Image (cartoon, rainbow, N blue to C red):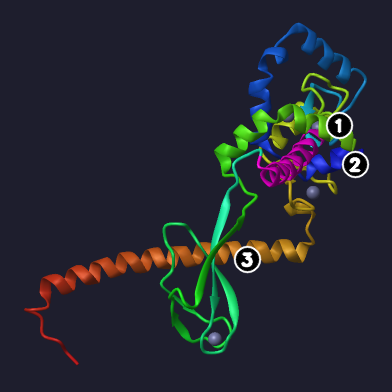
Amino acid sequence: MCDEDKQFLNNPDESLLRNIMMREKKSWNTKKYRDACAARIAGKTCIQCGSSEVLQVHHTLVKWKLYQKEEKEMAKLLIKEKMDKGEIEPQYKNFIKIKCPDCGAQYRAYFRSQSMPKTSTCRSCHTKLTLSESITTIEKELNYYIEKDGYIAFKEKYREEIKTRLKKKGVPDPPEYTDLSQDTIILCRKCHYAWHHGKTLCPICKKTYKRVHLPRCFYCLPPEEQERIKIAKKQREQEKKAYQELFEEDMRIDAEIEEEWRQKKINC
Ligand SMILES: [Zn+2]
Ligand SMILES: [Zn+2]
Ligand SMILES: [Zn+2]
Ligand SMILES: [Zn+2]
């Protein structure tokens, strides 16, 4: 198993995969693509269980995700540059600079433009201050952050520039979904099905499927650990049952109280 595959085993991302599949669906359903799959599978075995029956190609998206990460960082850098140059509308963070009249300490308090604070507690001497012009100045500084919609629009507008810069930086293009020589692994149908349900084959017994984030399946835990888990489960069930019985009993008593408290004599 290569490093990429190992990474894939620890890193499921179903929604991402679904998005790409929707986007690439056209190319995905062609005879050409099916032939490419058959060629990729020929002579291989499942990377998890070693079976050679009903093999399928699974996209790991490892390189694709790396590219996305680089792309995001580059976009952030570009936003900063363009705001500094005034090429895109600057976004400001507002803050007031406060000078405490009691101790002389100076500090900043950030606020949203509509809600300028009226009071503040001095960071240094903890005196509660009523803010007035004499002790505060309002200032602002560039905020290199664009909210989500703006960010998407930015990425769209500067797509080519981001791409060129990434190339210059030596970041390889993300593989095409239909290019099966990259970012794919071979799984048998059963392991593939388990994978899409968040489970991979236990590396110890190679029989049972385990949760992706766990190192081994239940049956490969030391016997005393298995016993401990079984007992804890039983205890929880018993507790639940006890509460249920208690609850039913309680309902009965409550009804009785409600009905009979006036008539019944209490013996004590
Ligand atoms: Zn398998
Ligand atoms: Zn898959
Ligand atoms: Zn102070
Ligand atoms: Zn196991």
- Decide which of tag 1 and tag 3 comes sooner along the chain: 1
Is 66 drawn above or below residue 248 in the view shown? above
Name the residue that disc number 2 marks. 3
Q: Find the distance from the CA under tag 2 to the CA under tag 3.
A: 38 Å
Kind of element beneath mark 1: helix
> Which of the labelled discs sits on residue 218, or is there none?
none
Figure quadrant of the N terminus: top right
The amino acid on which the numbered mark 3 sits, given as a three-letter code, is Ile
Point 73% across, 44% down: residue: 81
Q: Say whether disc 2 or disc 1 marks the residue closer to the N-terminus.
A: 2
Q: Is residue 13 left or right of residue 129?
A: right
Instruction: Please tell me which residue is depicted at 17% across the width and 71% down the height of the picture.
Output: 256
Task: Examine the structure image and report whether residue 97 is included in the region drawn in magenta.
Answer: no
Secondary element under disc 2, as helix, strand or loop, is helix
Q: Earlier in the sequence, mark 2 or mark 3?
A: 2
Ligand 2 within 8 angstroms of badge 1 C-beta: no
For the C terminus, the image quarter is bottom left
Farthest bottom residue? 268
Q: Nearer the viewer, mark 2 or mark 3?
A: 2
Query: Which callout, 1 or 3, points to the residue nearer the camera?
Result: 1
Which secondary structure, mark 3? helix
Q: Position of residue 153 (x, y in %)?
A: 60, 32
Q: Residue furthest front?
A: 134
| Label 3 crowd (10 A; few <14 / some 14-19 / many >=20) | few
Q: Position of residue 51 (x, y in %)?
A: 85, 29
Q: Which residue is tagged 3?
A: 231
Q: Residue at x 50, y 73 (%)?
A: 136
Q: Where residue 119 sits: x, y (%)?
A: 43, 76
Q: State which region is magenta.
A: 63-86
The residue located at (23%, 72%) in the rendering is: 253
